[in-house]
Image (tube, rainbow, N blue to C red):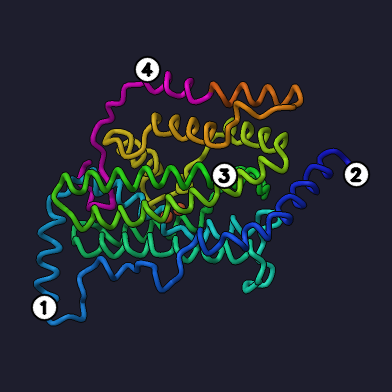
Amino acid sequence: MTNLEKSIRSRFEVIKGMESFVADNIDLLLKPVSESWQPSDFLPDMAAENRDEQLKDFRLKSENLPDELLVVLIGDMITEEALPTYQTWLNRLEGITDKTGTSSSAWAKWSRGWTSEENRHGDLLNKYLYLTGRVDMRAVEVTIHHLIRNGFDPKTENDPYLGFIYTSFQERATKISHSNVARLAIKAGDERLQKICGMIAGDEARHEKAYRLFMQKIFEADPMQAILSFAKMMKIKITMPAHLMYDGCDKNIFTKFSNIAQRIEVYTVKDYAEIISNLVKGWDIENIKGLSDLAAKAQDYLCSLSERYLNAANRFSFAGSAEKFSWIFDREA
Ligand SMILES: [Fe+2]
Ligand SMILES: [Fe+2]
């Protein structure tokens, strides 16, 4: 057996060894369906007698959202709507795979449970945006269609260590981004959108907690490989899951969307730095002992990484100009 084969084998064994831990904690990490919110809890009831009034009130509140906030919300919704891609990816991680589609293994239950909670995010944001009447829904739907066709490769190589580092990071990133949209929504007078994004951010926070806990267990069982994986993932950099989005005409639409998210401070380089520092502290990287030279180097790299991003963020002043978006009928944002 080569060293690489041995390391893959031991990772697989660590993941298998965590099954009972996941089984014991799954009910704490996921919410029962009976206690879960559903998209219709936050939307006008189209079956009600007073639906016209409900809709009028809904539109009155969403009327004052600035276009740039609308564009960021659309980009976030498109990202959530590519959920089939993320479930497929999760299901490829070694040891996590749901072999039949109804497997009773704890990892398979986790992946189906996580997906079912996530499924409400795109659903709710999609319906919200549709009802505002301010969005070119066809252009948005074309973008979702392209994105799912294009797929996404976060360079995690079906490796559960890299995978759980990626998800720990990404769930925190989405939590931050949805919370910031909630903050801007109330500023623009839309309490409903504040609640919607707040609820979604709450789910992301729970998912973040779960993935960090899984990774914590991996750090305990296999610190050397865990720290090397963390450093490797940070060197690769966390690619945003929707970076291959395309609306059929604008090759730069993802960059334009990210630039606005940076400009209105929904998700910024500073947030990226904060996430790194939060994970480094949370997994207590600094105090992991007994490492090989290579792993100790990775430890040093990780402990100073957030600082480097922060310095870069402070040097970088962002003044993006307004750009056209098909999603809002070619208005500029
Ligand atoms: Fe989500
Ligand atoms: Fe999430």
Amino acid under disc 2: Met
Q: Position of residue 127 (x, y in %)?
A: 29, 65
Distance CA(mark 1)–CA(mark 2): 70 Å
Answer yes or no: do the residues labelled 1 and 2 have beta carbons within 8 Å?
A: no
> Can you tell which of label 1 and label 4 is closer to the viewer?
1
Q: Which residue is mark 1?
A: 50
Secondary element at image label 1: loop
Amino acid under disc 4: Arg
Secondary element at image label 2: loop
> Can you tell which of label 3 and label 1 is closer to the viewer?
1
Q: Earlier in the sequence, mark 1 or mark 4?
A: 1
Front residue of 155/203: it is 203
* Crowdedness near tag 2: few (<14), some (14–19) or many (≥20) residues, C-alpha within 10 Å: few
Residue displayed at 22% across by 41% down? 333
Q: Earlier in the sequence, mark 2 or mark 3?
A: 2
Left-right relation of 290 to 172: right
Q: Is residue 317 magenta?
A: yes
Q: Which residue is mark 4?
A: 315
Distance CA(mark 2)–CA(mark 4): 48 Å
Q: Earlier in the sequence, mark 3 or mark 1?
A: 1
Front residue of 5/18: it is 18
Range of residues picked out in magenta: 305-333
Distance CA(mark 3)–CA(mark 1): 47 Å
Amino acid under disc 3: Pro
Q: Earlier in the sequence, mark 1 or mark 2?
A: 2
Q: Position of residue 146 (x, y in %)?
A: 45, 56
Q: Which residue is mark 2?
A: 1
Secondary element at image label 3: loop
Q: Which residue is mark 3?
A: 154
Front residue of 173/227: it is 227
